[in-house]
Image (tube, coloured by chain):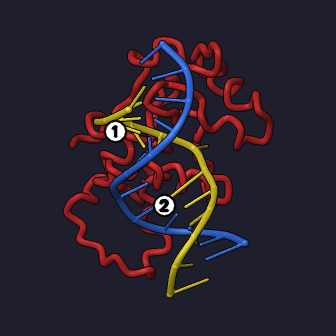
Chain colours: A red, B yellow, C blue
Amino acid sequence: MKKKAAKIKQEEKPRSTTRQYSFFEDVYAVVRQVPKGRVTTFGAIASYLGTKLSARMVGWAMNGAHTAEQKVPAHRVVNRNGMLSGKAHFATPTLMQELLEKEKIKVVDDTVVNFEKLFWDPAVALGW
DNA sequence: GCATTGACGAAGG
DNA sequence: CCCTTCGCCAATG
């Protein structure tokens, strides 16, 4: 992977509007690294990127995920409850769940079963 | 350029 | 325990 968000923390980026993608790429990079059969949360990603206080931005980044050139396994990203909060943003309301089930992840009532066990923390997996 | 919104999250009522 | 409010920051109207 050419792009990595491994050491964004030390990156001192200007808050200029010139960023355009920096933030988004970081999110995509992390999400793409989520192992199959695992899930992560907006908060975990946000925290890893150093913007834990604004998990919403991660959501926004995901909003543009479908326009990303490279696929982004957005279905592996759920909210802190393990709920498929973004399922409504997929092509079909059931697509997200189907993709997860394809990875052996059980989904009941729009929530990932054994979410705590399947939770993949980028801060830990990628090395904080 | 101000107001509203949003795939979140934590706290308060 | 359910619902509302607030914070965060970028995008959009």
Q: Position of residue A61 (x, y in %)?
A: 53, 56
Q: Position of residue A32 (x, y in %)?
A: 50, 44
Q: What element does badge 2 sit on?
A: helix
Q: Position of residue A20 (x, y in %)?
A: 49, 74
* Chain of the residue displaying label 1: A
Q: What element does badge 1 sit on?
A: helix
Closer-to-camera residue (A89/A33): A89
- Label 1 Cα crowd, 10 Å radius (few <14 / some 14-19 / many 20+): many
**Disc sitting over residue A109 in the figure:** none
Q: CA distance from mark 2 to mark 1?
A: 16 Å
Q: Amino acid at mark 1?
A: Pro
**Which residue in the structure is indicated by mark 1?**
A122
Q: Residue at x 25, y 56 (%)?
A: A7
Question: Would you say residue A70 is visible in this rendering?
Answer: no
User: Where, quadrant-wise, is the C terminus of chain A in this rendering?
Assistant: top left
**Disc sitting over residue A24 in the figure:** 2
Image: A94 above or below A72: above
> Is mark 2 in CB contact (under 8 Å) with mark 1?
no
Horizontally, residue A71 falls left or right of residue A42, namely: right
Q: Position of residue A112 (x, y in %)?
A: 54, 19
